[in-house]
């Protein structure tokens, strides 16, 4: 016979209240939420947080996430509060207007106490971690909340060199982090060369300094283009979110809805989305410009540090919907 699990708060058990009869997973979530409401009204925030969390884990409804976030806010757990309140507002149309206002006000308070970061990675299949904690895999960019202070983002993928980026997160501000993963070089195999007198001078030779310089700077330019592309994708996602939010507001309140008090919550959220999009677009543009400058320096080195007996080198800019960068042809 299958056993049913009943969720109830520690406060109810302490008071000698009998739990309800076994129920489905959905009614268990509602029962846990009801215990959370009782604990909240009594000011028992720890018990309220535990009950709201049980309800949200059983059934991730926006209202459960919002009440969990407000309980975490009352307990000073600002990062968790910001995450859950943001999750509750992603589907705000399902919320009653009073709950939506409460969650938005709580979200703004929690967000002002923490920092956030958008992390873009050049290989979407790479695993992304922050401070050793796994953030995800399979996306070009991630958005996370962080406590103010020193952090490290890291990307790793089998067959590629890990990239780590330490950064300082500031309260109330968003950091933009780019991770670029390069393929691991093939294992070096030492050639078997007969030891002769004639081979000695060749062994003393090496790659010309100009060639080494160019390889390094072209690699740096490629990294800048890859990071800029990741940031552009993240900005495009935010732009789509902003368009969807603006369309919902216009459908409900007309073209001048943001001038009315009834839509202040929705319009504030729209402004936050637009600000995040603008930050990402600025960072992407800076990354592309930096990559272009580095590539130009590398290309110019063919004139002031040429390699003897090589074919001419040509450079041409490339800009398409899928690619931005510089194509260099020649020998070096």
Image (cartoon, rainbow, N blue to C red):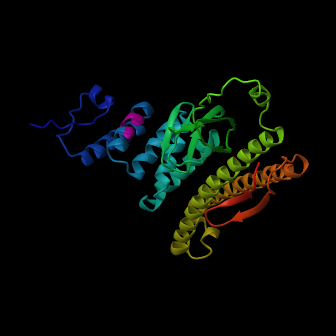
Q: In this view, does 263 lie above or below 148?
A: below
- Find the residue positioned furthest to the bottom: 254
Residue 57 occupies which quadrant of the picture?
A: top left
Q: What range of the chain is rendered magenta?
A: 48-53
- Which is nearer the eye, 125 or 17? 125
Q: How many marks?
A: 0
Q: In this view, does 215 lie above or below 268?
A: above
User: Dividing the image into 4 quarters, which one contains the N terminus?
Assistant: top left
Residue 273 occupies which quadrant of the picture?
A: bottom right
Residue 12: percent from left, percent from top: 29, 31
Residue 9: percent from left, percent from top: 32, 33
- Which is nearer the eye, 96 or 148? 148
- Which is nearer the eye, 150 or 74? 150
Residue 31 falls left or right of residue 263: left
Residue 96 falls left or right of residue 14: right
Q: Residue at the spot x=57%, y=31% of the render?
A: 131
Is residue 110 in the magenta section? no
* Residue 147 in view of the camera: no
Q: In this view, does 77 lie above or below 144?
A: above
Residue 100: percent from left, percent from top: 49, 56
Residue 241 occupies which quadrant of the picture?
A: bottom right
């Amino acid at each position: 016979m299958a056993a049913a699990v009943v969720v109830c708060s520690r406060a109810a058990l302490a008071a000698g209240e009998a739990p309800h009869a076994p129920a489905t997973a959905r009614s268990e979530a509602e029962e846990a939420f009801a215990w959370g409401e009782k604990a909240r009204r009594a000011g028992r925030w720890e018990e309220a947080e535990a009950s709201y969390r049980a309800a949200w884990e059983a059934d991730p409804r926006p209202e459960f996430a919002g009440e969990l976030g407000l309980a975490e806010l009352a307990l000073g757990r600002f990062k968790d509060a910001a995450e859950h309140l943001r999750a509750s507002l992603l589907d705000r149309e399902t919320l009653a207007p009073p709950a939506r206002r409460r969650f938005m006000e709580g979200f703004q308070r929690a967000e002002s106490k923490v920092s956030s970061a958008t992390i873009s990675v050049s290989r979407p299949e790479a695993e992304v971690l922050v401070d050793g904690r796994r953030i995800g895999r399979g996306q070009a960019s991630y958005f996370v909340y962080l406590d103010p202070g020193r952090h490290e983002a890291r990307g790793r993928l089998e067959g590629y060199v890990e990239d780590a980026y330490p950064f300082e997160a500031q309260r109330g501000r968003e950091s933009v982090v780019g991770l670029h993963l390069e393929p691991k070089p093939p294992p070096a195999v030492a050639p078997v060369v007969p030891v002769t007198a004639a081979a000695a001078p060749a062994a003393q030779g090496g790659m010309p300094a100009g060639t080494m310089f160019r390889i390094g700077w072209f690699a740096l330019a490629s990294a800048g283009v890859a990071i800029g592309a990741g940031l552009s994708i993240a900005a495009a996602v935010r732009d789509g979110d902003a368009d969807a939010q603006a369309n919902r507001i216009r459908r409900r309140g007309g073209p001048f809805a943001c001038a009315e008090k009834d839509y202040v919550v929705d319009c504030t959220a729209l402004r936050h989305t637009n600000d995040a999009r603008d930050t990402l677009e600025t960072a992407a543009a800076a990354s592309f410009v930096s990559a272009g400058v580095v590539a130009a320096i590398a290309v110019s080195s063919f004139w002031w540090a040429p390699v003897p007996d090589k074919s001419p080198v040509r450079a041409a800019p490339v800009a398409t919907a899928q690619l931005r960068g510089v194509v260099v042809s020649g020998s070096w």
